[in-house]
Amino acid sequence: MSVGSQGLEKSFAFSLFRTNAETSSAFIDMFSASSPREEMKGTASLSESGAYSQKAFRYLLEMESKRSERSGRFCQLLLVYSADEHGRIVQMNVDVAKIVIAAASRSFRETDYIGWYRDGRIVGAVLTVLTQESMVLVPTKLQPRLVECLRAELGIEEFSRLQIQVCHSHELEAIEFGT
């Protein structure tokens, strides 16, 4: 093989490697993004706590609600927030928020989305792909599992301030979440 053809082969191999690396990088970016939609581009999808940011979470909730309508399956929304002595929603303590998010991650399925329904105040979980029959599992199994985890990990005072509410996305308009 001549010196010129070896250089050509090396150049071709390098170009092929670079193209494959760029293609691999594009595939990784495409599949690891939280959403390919334009609304999600340029925004961080996960907060410091490991939960979806409010913008990303609301987007996922909207998409899951639309998908549920089309498929005939259901989704429910579980909300956890801290309330003051008058029942008003207050800023969640950072350490309590981390525990709530970690407990929700352990209590729910990998297909469910956990994030901030309202940044710093309300942690939400979109419980996806539920049949009419399985919807009873939320209040009878999933919610009690979360309560058990929170009770074990939080002090009595912090736990007593937490409120947990389960609803359908279409019910959110009727629920007042004042600050």
Image (spheres, helix red, strand yellow):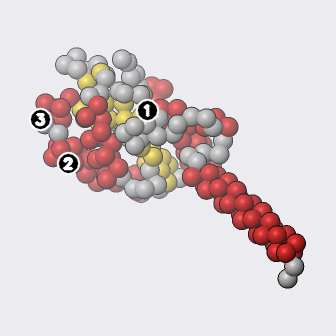
Please name the amino acid that badge 3 sits on: Ile
Q: Residues within 10 Å of mark 3 (few under 14, many from 20)?
A: few
Residue 118 found in image quarter? top left
Q: Measuring 37% from the left and 27% from the top, which residue is drawn there?
A: 120
Q: Measuring 35% from the left and 50% from the top, which residue is drawn there?
A: 105
Q: Earlier in the sequence, mark 1 or mark 3?
A: 1
Q: Horizontal and vertical percent for residue 24?
A: 66, 60
Q: Measuring 35% from the left and 27% from the top, which residue is drawn there?
A: 121
Please name the amino acid that badge 2 sits on: Glu
How far separated are the C-alphas under marks 2 and 1?
A: 22 Å
Quadrant where the C terminus is found in the figure: top left
Q: Horizontal and vertical percent for residue 36?
A: 65, 45
| Residue position for label 2 | 148
User: Dot 2: what SS?
Assistant: helix
| Residue position for label 3 | 156
| Left or right: residue 163 compared with residue 47 | left
| Left or right: residue 77 compared with residue 161 | right
Taking 117 as reference, is 71 above or below it?
below
| Left or right: residue 104 compared with residue 175 | left
| Residue position for label 1 | 117
- Residues 60 and 139: in front is 60
How far separated are the C-alphas under marks 1 and 3?
A: 24 Å
Please name the amino acid that badge 1 sits on: Tyr
Quadrant where the N terminus is found in the figure: bottom right
Q: Horizontal and vertical percent for residue 19?
A: 75, 60
| Left or right: residue 67 compared with residue 54 | right
Q: Horizontal and vertical percent for residue 21?
A: 68, 60
Furthest-bottom residue in this view: 1
Q: Residues within 10 Å of mark 1 (few under 14, many from 20)?
A: many
Taking 134 as reference, is 103 above or below it?
above
